[in-house]
């Protein structure tokens, strides 16, 4: 009887041990700068009479949500029109301000919060047409 109970206890302990070891990507990469991120941007339709907006999502390999800052640089014909740095904590929509009609290049750079963050900085760019 004792051997059966010890065997059952050991089996249950091992099962919970295996489940306890699985986790998100942040747990899988506990060292500084080991979890890759990807900045994704979806511009909203823009018109010159209203502020242009962009939806920003920072994806990771796991289910953890990175926090940090997103630097937004808007250029037209190679010249900087506006620059802003905003705090990122989840899926966010940011206003770019009112822009004149034309074609703009928008660059986004995500910088993780803290020097000891497990996330890697990432960036992207897209073209925005203002009607």
Image: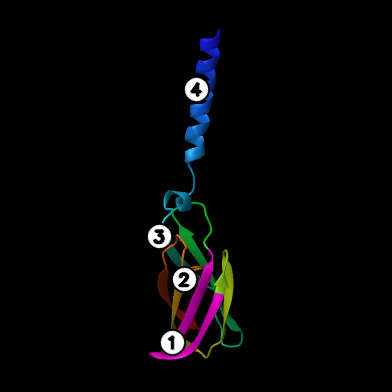
Q: Secondary structure at mark 4?
A: helix
Q: Residue furthest top?
A: 1
**Mark 4 or mark 2: whose residue is earlier in sequence:** 4
Image coordinates of residue 105 in percent, x first then y, are 42, 82
Where is mark 4, residue-wise?
11
Where is mark 1, residue-wise?
75
Q: CA distance from mark 1 to mark 2?
A: 20 Å
Label 4 environment density (alpha carbons within 10 Å; few <14, some 14–19, many ≥20): few
**Residue 71 within the magenta-colored segment of the rendering:** yes
**Mark 3 or mark 4: whose residue is earlier in sequence:** 4
Label 2 environment density (alpha carbons within 10 Å; few <14, some 14–19, many ≥20): many
Image depth: mark 1 or mark 2 in front: 2
Quadrant including the N terminus: top right
Image coordinates of residue 59 in percent, x first then y, are 47, 60
Image depth: mark 4 or mark 2 in front: 4
Q: CA distance from mark 4 to mark 2?
A: 44 Å
């Amino acid at each position: 009887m004792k051997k059966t109970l010890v065997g059952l206890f050991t089996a249950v302990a091992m099962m919970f041990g295996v489940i306890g070891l699985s986790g998100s990507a942040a747990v899988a990469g506990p060292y500084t700068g080991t979890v890759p991120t990807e900045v994704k941007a979806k511009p909203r339709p823009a018109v010159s009479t209203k502020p242009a907006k962009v939806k920003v999502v920072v994806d990771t390999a796991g289910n953890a949500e990175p926090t940090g800052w997103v630097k937004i640089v808007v250029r037209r014909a190679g010249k900087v029109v506006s620059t802003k740095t905003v705090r990122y904590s989840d899926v966010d929509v940011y206003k770019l301000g009112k822009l004149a009609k034309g074609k703009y290049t928008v660059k986004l750079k995500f910088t993780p919060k803290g020097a000891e963050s497990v996330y890697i900085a990432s960036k992207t760019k897209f073209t925005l047409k203002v009607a």
